[in-house]
């Protein structure tokens, strides 16, 4: 398994500002993902954070709005830029752990960041 | 494209009783995995149980078991001897068999266990 921490755990932000969310893992992982969970909704994949290269974004999400960094195998950031109230969501980091101990390539999730945009 | 459908937005059950949550999915893949995740009020997503599509035997984890019907593309979760701590949102999820496969989630079922 993997222990994943996210900062901040929650924040309230003003419209038009940006927030950077950090995801830290206690072990090296093959892949890191960022999901959004809007109120009362399921999880939607925003992008896959690739180490050493640009993130791979899902349809409907763009780099200018959600820039992502992954400088190494244990850390990633997601920035929510030029925020509007529609960006109010929980943002979750998820990882896949290396190795034969994880034959399902199971994904583990961080505790999430609850963002409210006023 | 893969889709996952959970038709029950909310369910409730008395403590110690049994409840079944339904999930159906649509895919043209033959090799895939299915998961049930639990999200309690703490927001932490916790893996409850997993099933490999090529295994006919239904997965079981203590009080949690699945009824996997591959032909019908159905993957229901049975919780036996329900406990108050089982109160959570439950998400059904699908992953293609490739190592790069992303997770596709259903909309979730909010389960409440009453004393």
Image: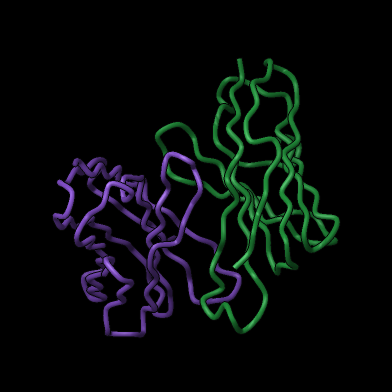
Say if A32 sits above or below A66 in the image.
Answer: below
Instruction: Report if residue A92 is visible in the image.
Output: yes
Image point (16%, 46%), residue name = B13
Q: Colour of chain B?
A: purple
Image location of residue A89, percent across then percent down: 54, 32
Instruction: Report if residue A59 is visible in the image.
Output: no
Name the side, left or right, on which B9 lies relative to A71.
Answer: left
Name the side, left or right, on which A50 lies relative to B38.
Answer: right
Name the side, left or right, on which B26 lies relative to A111.
Answer: left
Q: Looking at the image, which residue sits at the far front?
A: B115
Q: Quadrant of residue A26?
A: bottom right
Image location of residue A4, percent across then percent down: 65, 54
Image point (56%, 27%), residue name = A88
Name the side, left or right, on which B103 lies relative to B14.
Answer: right
Say if B30 sits above or below B20 in the image.
Answer: below
Where's the N terminus of chain A, which quadrant?
Answer: bottom right
Q: How does the figure colour the protein chain or chains?
A: by chain
Say if A48 sits above or below B66 in the image.
Answer: above
Image location of residue A61, percent across then percent down: 63, 42
Q: Quadrant of residue B63?
A: bottom left
Front in this rendered view, residue B33 or A55:
B33
Q: Colour of chain A?
A: green
Image location of residue A39, percent across then percent down: 45, 31
Image point (36%, 78%), residue name = B53
Where's the C terminus of chain A, which quadrant?
Answer: top right
């Amino acid at each position: 398994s993997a222990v994943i921490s996210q900062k901040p755990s929650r924040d309230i932000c003003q419209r038009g500002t940006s927030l950077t969310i950090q995801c830290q893992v206690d072990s090296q992982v093959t892949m890191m993902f960022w999901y959004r969970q809007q109120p009362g909704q399921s999880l939607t994949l925003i992008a896959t954070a690739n180490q050493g290269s640009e993130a791979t974004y899902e349809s409907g999400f763009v780099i200018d709005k959600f820039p992502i960094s992954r400088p190494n195998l244990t850390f990633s950031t997601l920035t929510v830029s030029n925020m509007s109230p529609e960006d109010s969501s929980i943002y979750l980091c998820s990882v896949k752990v290396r190795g034969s101990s994880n034959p399902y390539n199971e994904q583990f999730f961080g505790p999430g960041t609850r963002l409210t945009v006023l | 494209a893969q889709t996952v459908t959970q038709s029950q937005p909310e369910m409730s059950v008395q403590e110690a009783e049994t409840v079944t949550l339904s999930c159906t999915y649509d895919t043209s893949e033959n090799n895939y995995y299915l998961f049930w995740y639990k999200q309690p009020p703490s927001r932490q997503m916790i893996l409850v149980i997993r099933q490999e599509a090529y295994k006919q035997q239904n997965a079981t984890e203590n009080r949690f078991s699945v009824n996997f019907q591959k032909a019908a593309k159905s993957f229901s979760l049975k919780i036996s001897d329900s406990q108050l701590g089982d109160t959570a949102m439950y998400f059904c999820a699908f992953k293609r068999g490739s190592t790069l496969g992303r997770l596709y989630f259903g909309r979730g079922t909010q389960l409440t266990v009453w004393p």
